[in-house]
Amino acid sequence: MSTFIRGPVCGADNCPSRLWRIIDGRRTCQYGHVMDGDVEFNDDEDDLNGLAAGVITRRLNLTTNATGSFQSSQLSNSQLLLQQQRRSHKKFKKLIGHEAKLLFLKSFQFILKRQTRWLIDEMHFPAEFDHVVKIIWLKLLKTINDQPREELRLRLHMASTVSILYLASTHLSLPVYTCDYIKWICTTKMPYFQASELLPKSWRTRLPNYYISILEGSISPFNGQLCNKIALTCGTIQFNKSFNSQVSCQGLLLKLVMQYALPPEFYFYTKQIIEFQETDIKNLALWERIDERHTGPISNHAELRIISYFMLTIHWIISFDQDHRYPLKWILELSSSLTRHSTTRESIDRNIVNVVYPDKSTSNDYFQWSDEETLQFLNWMEKQFLPTQTRSLDDESGSNDMTIDQKIARRKLYKIFPLDPDTNRDHEAIDSKHQLTFIEDLQERYAKQQSFLNNNKTVHFTTRQDIHLPTRKEAVNSLMTQIASQLSADFAISEQQLKDCIYRLKKACIHKMN
Amino acid sequence: MFEVPITLTNKKFAQRRKLKYQYINHLSRRFDRITKKINTTDSLPTPENSAAENNEEDYEDDEEERNYESDVGESSVRQQTKRRRERHWKSVIGELYSSTETESDSQEEDVQEGDQVEHETRPKEEDTDEERKFWKKYEKPEKSFEVWQTVSSQNRSPINKQIITYHNFKKIEKNSLRKMEIPLLHCTKENKLYFQLLAKGLEPLQSPTSAARNYQTRHIITLTNLLHLNVSRHNWPLAYKIFATLIRIPNVRIKSIWGIGVKILDNSPNSSSSLDFLKWMCQVYSSKSRFVQNVNYRSVVPPFQTGSRTHTSKFAITYLWSSLINCQKAIESSNVTDNQYEVENSRLEELIDKISEWVLIPPFMEDAEVYFIYASCHLLKADILSRQFVNDNRNSDLVGLNKDININQVIKHIHYVKVFLQTCLEKGGFTIPSRLIENQLKSFESRLYGEAHDIREREMVDDYGNTDNSSADNSFGDVYETNAEFLDTQLMDLPPIENEMAENHYSDEDSSE
């Protein structure tokens, strides 16, 4: 037996060898150290099944089982001892009590800092953003500090990081809204999911598991959780007193109008309704929630009010129009353009967000995805998602929870299934060139509508004859349903909540009109 | 939509399961009490059970039945205690009783009965895991999804034909529901609703995966669905990419999707072969632990995902089959003189070596299918070797001593085929076209000698060459008659001792080569 077999590190006298061979039935490493407790003997019965006589008997336990460990032996005793010692060392023990809380606050702050830096670097937020976040965080820390130490409740969650960032961006009147934050975290652009992996290793090993699981952010905020969290954070630090809490309504409206490629007049219609109802557009301020237990009506949140007004406007304008300005065909075209699958970066991002929420009607859209969309989704998976999942696994020294055998096995598996065989790469390169930008896509969508809006006189008569077309009411309803489902996914609220909010505002509007 | 390759466990599901089994167990206990039957068997209406039913009806009247059953009840309880003691001692001694294991496993049902009787008499017994208690009543299949017990007659029990009135049924239900009130107090609103739904016999539309909210889980679900979708559309490049992505996510159980992976690799031209993957599976997941009936295998469905001491894992079998078929194909296509031929030949040798090692260790040594594959390997080898005599008649190598050696080799392989087929038949549970193979062997052997048979044999090889592995019907054999007198092994119906001697002889030659 002269061939070497790869196995665990020998370790005797700091021997680095991983190669083993069998000499006289004893496992011996490259440099001649004999492995403890690994004696191999030939225990086959000689006439197995009546045919073994005369056949050369084979030794069974020569091989490594490809996970790299020898089948006959585990780690040698000295190595096991070493590992246990390392585990029980003080440096690796989990903290408890107050110290753990302090470390958690430090970790939280660390993640917050990473997020802020990402926003400034990648999204080109102003440099002052950093300071504002700091001030808000300090205010929040102060409220935590004011609590008695015995019954200290942190009430921090990964959603709190987003709410702090959101408050800061509102203070600076940046045109950034909850939907943007949701999109950024769901596409793992901004550190959120598995954020605990970002922490320095020494912190992570000492942080209690409970806190680590909080920092993993396992579930993306849903059913208006993010709005509620923002309101609560706002309430705890009394945001309105010292900060600018006015939501920049115009930006959001513009965004919505562009997203659905509506004619520009809808922007003004909506603005008028808001000004009529709220008396001034500046009155849309963040809501401070004091009550911890009860979330209150969803229509308290300024942003949700804006999108509800927006939907209300579309509904009223289109319903009462009666084919004068906005013919039926235009509505149909609009609603079909919403479901059309394109591969702009925005629509890919939207696909990803939709997948994350299980109870939305859009969550099963991927059954209709084109190959191109699927490919884009997979590319995103490969480039953005997988790195966050396997961050700790990749650095070899960092992962304590995997034995060397498992690592070897995993590496072998990845070799069998390389992520991108060379054939795919050229294909991708061509594809990325053809990707439409948002502006191009928007232009295309407006151009498509144009024919319906301009010569509506001629269209007017042709539509009447076509029996297959749905009635105007049906078309409007289906359009509204589509917009509602998209909006509820974007803002991470449930469709029921959106419906409630719209209903409430509608009632208020009608009341005021009368 | 499709089965997700991760284990979905959380508090919610655990609570649901607990409620469900608590309710079912309580219901069945009440039912037993009301029907005054001590020895209820909660067995399913299997063919055997109904057969047992019929037998009983032959010689028993309705009045006697009651007596009979109580008799059986007592005796069975006695039997069970005896059996249990026996098992206990066996486990103390540490004896391996794998041969009797299936039998004792199937008696689990009876043991549970005994437990129930005890439970009735001593209601203050400690509260065990309700789910386990429920599943103890049923046989957990290891090799297939269903188990019909035909082996032992003791397990046959009549189908429970007793009728209860609607009033009684309502009474039982009401009682059990009342009992459930307390646990329901402590659970979430959603789970309470879920339970009430189940209790009314409705099926919740929401599957556990459709409601999962975890970010990672959501993506795994999406990828799984996309994978199935693209495999069904035969969109292999995309499916490959999805699979490669999926296995890189931590916590994904590759054991439950290996089949798809093999299929994808078979259909992607520029990737590593599926054999490598199967080999990897065999090496990494070669579990030899014993299949324990008492454990609830919630996440892992044993038949397709794992192996155990008594059950060969499916990926191992697939590995053997596909490597054999690969060898066969490669050899068929390549020429004898080719370099390629040598490579393939050595691969076949390797495969034979590997199986010969495998059959020495537990799961494989009891598996008839493995032995059949082993025999098929030798069949292929014999075919290749014997073909030299047909094709290369004018080959100068095949004279004198060389010819003898070659003939001996062929005979050795033919002999092995017979031995392993015999083993395969002894192990049972696997049907083989033995007639067909015998004829095949005859034809191989006759190649060695008579040129006169040449033409006929060639025809035969052409007919069967490709189908020898499939289980085609074996009635063809009669058509071909060979002169058995010419052939060595056909007359070699030797007693075992001589058999061994013959082998001795061959292997000596082997080593001298």
Image (tube, grey):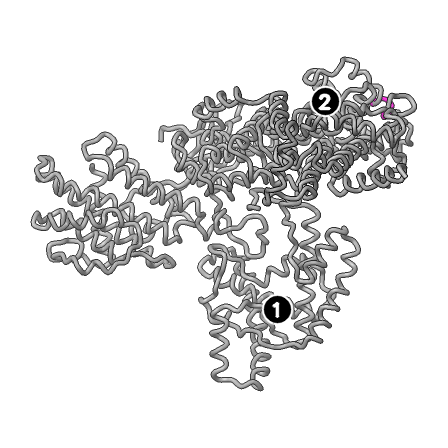
Same chain for the residues at labels 2 and 1, yes or no? no
Look at the numbered disc 2 and give the secondary structure of its residue: helix
Q: Residue at x 78, y 17 (%)?
A: A129
**Residue A149: assigned label:** none
Using the rendered view, name the quadrant where residue A28 is placed: top left
Indicate the position of residue A417 as horizontal and vertical percent values. Answer: 47, 31
Q: Is residue B215 visible?
A: no
Mark 2, residues whose alpha carbon is within 10 Å: few (<14), some, or many (≥20)? many
Q: Nearer the viewer, residue B363 or A270?
A: A270
Chain letter behind tag 1: B
**Residue B119 in picture, x, y percent from top left:** 68, 67
**Majority SS type along the magenta span:** helix
Is residue A485 toward the left or the right of residue B348 in the image? right
Can residue B161 be found in the magenta stretch? Answer: no
Span highlighted in magenta in the image: A137-141
Give the amino acid type for the residue marked by disc 1 in the picture.
Answer: Gly
Residue under numbered circle 1: B114
Mark 2 or 1: the one toward you:
2
The quadrant holding residue B125 is: bottom right
Instruction: Look at label 2 and name its amino acid.
Output: Gln
**From what the image shows, is residue B222 above or below residue A421?**
below
Disc 1 packing (10 Å; few <14; some 14–19; many ≥20)? many
In the rendered image, which quarter contains the C terminus of chain B? Answer: top left
Query: Can you give x and y, in whole percent of width and height, for residue A206 in the image?
Result: 72, 29
Note whether A385 is above or below B510 in the view shown. above
Q: Nearer the viewer, residue B56 or B485?
A: B56
Relative to residue B511, is residue A62 drawn left or right?
A: right
Q: Chain of mark 2?
A: A
Alpha carbon distance from label 2 to label 1 = 62 Å
| Residue B400 in view, yes or no | yes
Check disc 2 and report the residue beneath it.
Answer: A115
Residue B256 in the image, given as x and y percentages of width and height: 51, 44
